[in-house]
Amino acid sequence: MTQAISETFMTRIKALGRLWRDFSGGRGDGPVFAPDLPDDDLERLAEQMRACLEVRGGEVSARARAAELGRAYLALSADGRRRFLSLMVHRFGPDRTAVDAALARLAEAGEGERAAVERALRTALEPPWLRLLTQFNALPEGVKFLVDLRAELMAMARGDAALAALEADLKGLLASWFDVGFLELRRITWRSPACVLEKIMAYEAVHAIQGWDDLKNRLDSDRRLYAFFHPRMPDEPLIFVEVALVKGIAGNVHDLLDTAAPAGDPEAADTAIFYSINNAQKGLAGISFGNFLIKRVVEELTAEFPRLATFATLSPIPGFRAWLEERLAQGEPGLLTAAEHRQLTAMSNGLGAKGSLKALLADGGWGDDAMLAEALSAPLTRLAARYLVLEKKGDGRALDPVAHFHLSNGARVERLNWRADVSTKGLAQSSGLMVNYLYNPDEIEANHEAYAGTGKVAVSPEIKGLVRG
């Protein structure tokens, strides 16, 4: 986890310490631990964890103790939190003796007793730490605490098998709580609660929101913003999508984000452009509900605007430039066609510049030179098509994470747009290119099945021509 994320996590959960102090009845007799949780404190902490698990004094007392345990965690340093979680893993994991005994009984069980023995094995495999974590669910803001805790734990677990097991269990717990059937779709408007609007601004990671005027523009009459919420986190968007209602498929994000542009007529729009999709909760990574969001939003938009005929994205290509630079570092043979080599060499000689693609891209000023940018448009667009369609991970998934998301949801790669995002971020990620993914309701299921089954990427004739070129 980055330092910024850690600081955000700690800023948010410090407020929980005060809230949970009130929840525990203001009891001040709970154990106090040194911030780094030295060895002398570990046994006292283990005893507090055991008390929570044994439900001494009934459920109400147990939850008050859980609040005290949570407050103790919040008061620790980063090293102390790691030691806290490591103690939980090593002292309150599955009882291996009970697991081995259950396995032995299973091996000898007859057909009539097998079901009971399997239940006993499942019980033995369930670690007490899972019950400890579950107790936070009953605390105010407890679910949000666990979501943020997993965000921090994901970084701690790298290279630590024990913490990785805890992280996996916490992910499974959250996945059961955040089933899409429990989620509520809400449209966000300028009249939505200020706390929600502030979080939308903070969580927007695709195209940063530049203040309240920018946000208001994204909530105008020709725009829609929808988010999923969970009933235990009513003011926390889980994932949200920003939509522009336009005529024709948009190819430039600056036009969509222009706060000075007049609002369009949504009733005259024939196309819905999904131009920003954000997973707002890092602790829910790997728990997918983005595909359900898009489908639900399409249903909402179709009901409100029957004239809409096209649903597409205007998406970044975040991994393209990194992939290209890696290939360029290995040498350029096979990347450019002979005609592209000749064109770039002639253009470079005229400008007194080096003729290789690697050298041209290394010169940060190429984006400001109209002639040079035009010369680079064809090779870079063709290479971007190759990257999106042909470059795969070992498991057959698209190398680009945004491409994988949309292809998994049944979209097809429709069109590449040159100089669609010439912001510093856009140039650094994709040399200014953006891509439209098209969601055709008649093709979504077939596209999804083909991609999930064989890794086949659905493409438009235009993209197919670029890849063959």
Image (tube, rainbow, N blue to C red):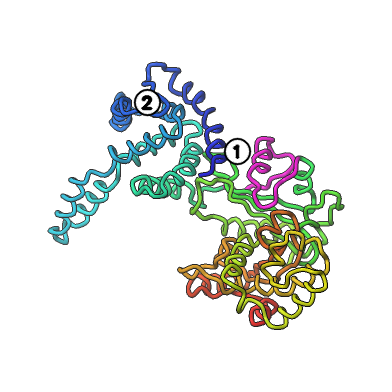
**Disc 2 residue crowd, few under 14, some 14–19, many 20+, Cα 10 Å:** many
Residue 439 in view: yes
The residue that label 2 is drawn on is 65
Q: Earlier in the sequence, mark 2 or mark 1?
A: 2
Residue 250 in view: no
Asked if residue 98 is positioned above or below residue 344 in the image, the reply reads above
Residue sitting at 32 percent across and 41 percent down? 89
Quadrant location of residue 156? top left
The residue that label 1 is drawn on is 235
Nearest to the observer: residue 376 or residue 205: 376
Residue 131 % position (x, y): 34, 39
Q: Separation of disc 2 and disc 1 at Cα?
A: 26 Å
Name the side, left or right, on which 399 lies relative to 385.
left
Magenta span includes 199:
yes
Residue 415 % position (x, y): 70, 71
Quadrant location of residue 434? bottom right
Residue sitting at 41 percent across and 32 percent down? 80
Q: Amino acid at mark 1?
A: Asp
- Mark on residue 143? none
Name the side, left or right, on which 197 lies relative to 6.
right
Name the side, left or right, on which 130 lies relative to 364.
left
Residue 169 % position (x, y): 38, 47
User: Element type at marker 1?
Assistant: loop
Magenta span includes 464:
no
Nearest to the observer: residue 356 or residue 6: 356
Q: Amino acid at mark 2?
A: Arg
Name the side, left or right, on which 398 lies relative to 351.
left
User: Element type at marker 2?
Assistant: helix
The region drawn magenta spans 184-211
Does the CB distance between marks 2 and 1 fall below 8 Å? no
Residue sitting at 56 percent across and 32 percent down? 11
